[in-house]
Amino acid sequence: MSIDAIANLRTLRDVLRYAVTRFNERPIFFGHGQLDAFDEAAFLVTRAMKLPLERMEIFLDAFLTHAEINSLIELIERRVKKRVPVAYLLGEAWLQGYRFFVDSRVIIPRSFIAELLKDELKPWLPDPAAVRSVLDLCTGSGCLAVIAADLFVNASVDAVDISVDALAVAARNVEEYGLADRVRLIESDLFQALGASRYDLILCNPPYVTDKALSKLPREYSHEPTLALAGGPDGLDVVRRVVADARGRLNPQGLLVVEVGDGRAEVEREYPQTPVTWATTSAGDDMVFMVRAEDLPARIPATRTVAA
């Protein structure tokens, strides 16, 4: 953008309009929290300026300094040319009203399990106050662990990830919410480092993108850690391991909650005899399944059959 063109941008409204135009000019992907070019532009511009998105109208005609305009233009161009997701540009993402620090060490929070947590997993958990222990497997940024600790006020939460980098991000979020005394961060390959611990509730938003789908993801996803996305040939590599060991990790009447994206058909093919409940989310009934402890066999053998 030329110096003369930048000089014509004076107000927040001007920069917002410019951002919308730039985002519509290029084939960028809106899949990390915003729905379209306007939502993306509004979030980027207002949050970069530390302004409340829900009250943006108050500030639209506010004049910006040259330094502020230049900073915003740089962010807009990185979004367009480098396809960096806005959450990474700003260092923040929002999930169900909770703000989380994020960077490229973790995937951007977008779990449908968070929607169910906001309702305290009712009716599947009739008494949220009775939940005393929660395990969040593949915690990433720690978003589900933080939300669970905030809503299940009597629970201690173990947040597990195999990635030390991810746990460093999670630690910052746990600290910012003042939950360090109730959320324990553990480096572990799923259940391996948990000793004999058992839980009333196990949450898991694992890597579930199939190999085929991973190769076709928009460029924005290349900025996220592949470890947190890749689920193997049918997307169930991690899911199988979680389901196989979950019963031995749940208290009586405990609940396992797992997100699988669009993998419902694969899950039902893998576990035809297991009473699985599919929860309703904003994306439909195919994203998150739940199983009671007593409905999980003591050990489910791997029976994967993947077409060549």
Image (cartoon, helix red, strand yellow):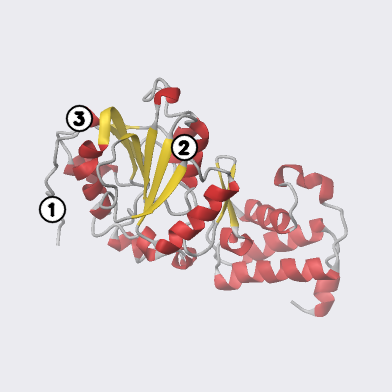
Pointer 2: what residue?
148
Q: Amino acid at mark 1?
A: Thr
Q: Position of residue 236 (x, y in %)?
A: 25, 51
Which of the two marks, 3 or 2, is nearer to us in this view? 2
The quarter of the rendered structure image containing the C terminus is bottom left
Q: Is residue 226 visible?
A: yes
Q: Nearer the viewer, residue 220 or 292?
A: 292
Mark 2 is surrounded, within 10 Å at the Cα level, by few (under 14), some (14 to 19) or many (20 or more) other residues, namely many
Residue 121, horizontal then vertical, whole percent: 42, 29
Name the front one of labels 1 and 2. 2
Residue at screen point 17% across, 39% down: 271
* Of callouts 1 and 3, the N-terminal one: 3
| The label number, if any, that marks residue 305 in the structure image | 1
Verify CB contact (< 8 Å) between mark 3 and mark 2.
no
In this view, which residue lies farthest toward the top? Answer: 126
- Tell me the element at label 3: helix
Q: Residue at x 77, y 62 (%)?
A: 15
Q: Position of residue 24 (x, y in %)?
A: 63, 61
Element class at badge 1: loop
17 vs 224, left or right, is right
Q: Secondary structure at mark 2?
A: helix
Badge 3 is on which residue?
295
Looking at the image, which is closer to me, 48 or 77? 48
Q: Which amino acid does the dot numbered 2 rest on?
A: Ala
How many marks the image carries: the answer is 3
